[in-house]
């Protein structure tokens, strides 16, 4: 089991080697790249080659890429959505193209998982004709062969909409016989939908990666763990009970004190988790 961090924390900035070095300095050994073109231009193969070199230099592993969900993201304000669940054939074709380009990064910067939203979270008021199960299935039908070709496994994420509860994602995989899909348990999202440990136990058989963040129980705050209402001691015991030994990956929003200060608090939260798990990492002594 190792700890990772999403570049979502820095999404308002152009990603560069300094971000990865700062992550490594706080003891995060894996990274998920948040694919918005204003943050990292995943259309450009040279950007992918640069990303691979930056990761190697910083000593971090490129664990995953978060599939495109919007044209841009400023703070909590979304631009036009890039949705897998739209009923519009033209918009769905665009989504498939954007996700295919994100998958193509793996040809020059190998990674394990493409984390994929099914539709749009409810709080972003999906337009009429979005979050359609049939549309999601058509999108997956197009993307799964591409992912297999570049050696990436798609991980569908628990997000706050009716398509993407823990139970619905398991049902999708089993009913549609999609064994190549895994699940990304986003624990903050799961907390907004009910009990986090129940969600963990529900997805355990398909769990391949995680998003760890906290909230106050009302909105998707993306707080540093231990700063909200989630019982992290209980949840970490749950990960051990289900036998999950993969990456525990933080997905955070920059606090009012800025991204750098949020990263330092994330490093402290990581150390606290290591203590609760009884782990002994080289980075644990700061």
Image (cartoon, helix red, strand yellow):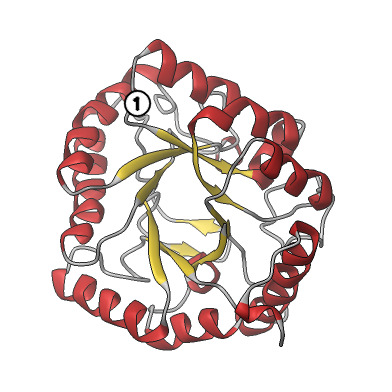
Q: How many marks?
A: 1
Q: Which is nearer the eye, 26 or 48?
A: 26
Residue 261, compared with residue 247, is above or below; it is: below
Visible in this render: residue 165?
no
Q: Position of residue 233 (x, y in %)?
A: 82, 51
Quadrant of residue 212 in the image? Answer: bottom right
Residue 149, compared with residue 45, is above or below; it is: above
Local crowd at mark 1 within 10 Å, few (<14), some, or many (≥20)?
Answer: many
Visible in this render: residue 13?
yes
Image point (67%, 49%), residue name? 220
Residue 175, compared with residue 31, is above or below; it is: above
Residue of label 1:
136
Quadrant of residue 279 in the image? Answer: bottom right
Image point (74%, 35%), residue name? 197
Image point (72%, 84%), residue name? 285
Q: Position of residue 56 (x, y in %)?
A: 33, 80
Instruction: Look at the numbered disc 1 and give the secondary structure of its residue.
Output: helix
Quadrant of residue 3 in the image? Answer: bottom right
């Amino acid at each position: 089991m190792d700890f990772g961090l999403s570049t979502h924390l820095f999404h308002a900035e152009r990603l560069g080697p300094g971000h990865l070095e700062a992550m490594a300095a706080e003891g995060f050994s894996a990274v998920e790249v948040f694919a918005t073109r204003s943050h990292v231009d995943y259309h450009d193969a040279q950007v992918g080659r640069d990303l691979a070199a930056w990761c190697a230099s910083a000593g971090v592993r490129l664990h995953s890429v978060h599939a495109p969900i919007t044209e841009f993201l400023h703070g909590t304000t979304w631009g036009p959505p890039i949705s897998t669940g739209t009923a519009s054939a033209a918009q769905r074709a665009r989504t498939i193209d954007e996700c295919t380009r994100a998958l193509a990064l793996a040809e020059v910067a190998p990674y394990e998982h493409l984390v994929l939203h099914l539709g749009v979270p409810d709080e972003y008021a999906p337009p009429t004709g979005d979050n359609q199960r049939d549309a999601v299935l058509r999108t997956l039908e197009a993307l799964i062969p591409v992912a297999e070709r570049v050696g990436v496994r798609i991980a569908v994420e628990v997000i706050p909409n009716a398509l993407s509860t823990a139970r619905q994602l398991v049902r999708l995989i089993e009913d549609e016989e999609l064994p190549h899909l895994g699940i990304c348990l986003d624990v903050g999202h799961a907390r907004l939908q009910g009990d986090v440990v129940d969600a963990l136990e529900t997805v355990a058989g398909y769990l391949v990666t995680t998003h760890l963040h906290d909230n106050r129980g009302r909105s998707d705050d993306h707080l540093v763990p231990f700063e909200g209402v989630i019982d992290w001691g209980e949840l970490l015991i749950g990960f051990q009970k289900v036998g999950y030994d993969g990456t525990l990956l933080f997905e955070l929003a920059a606090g009012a004190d800025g991204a750098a200060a949020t990263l330092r608090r994330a490093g402290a939260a990581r150390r606290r988790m290591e203590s609760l798990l009884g782990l002994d990492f080289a980075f644990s002594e700061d």
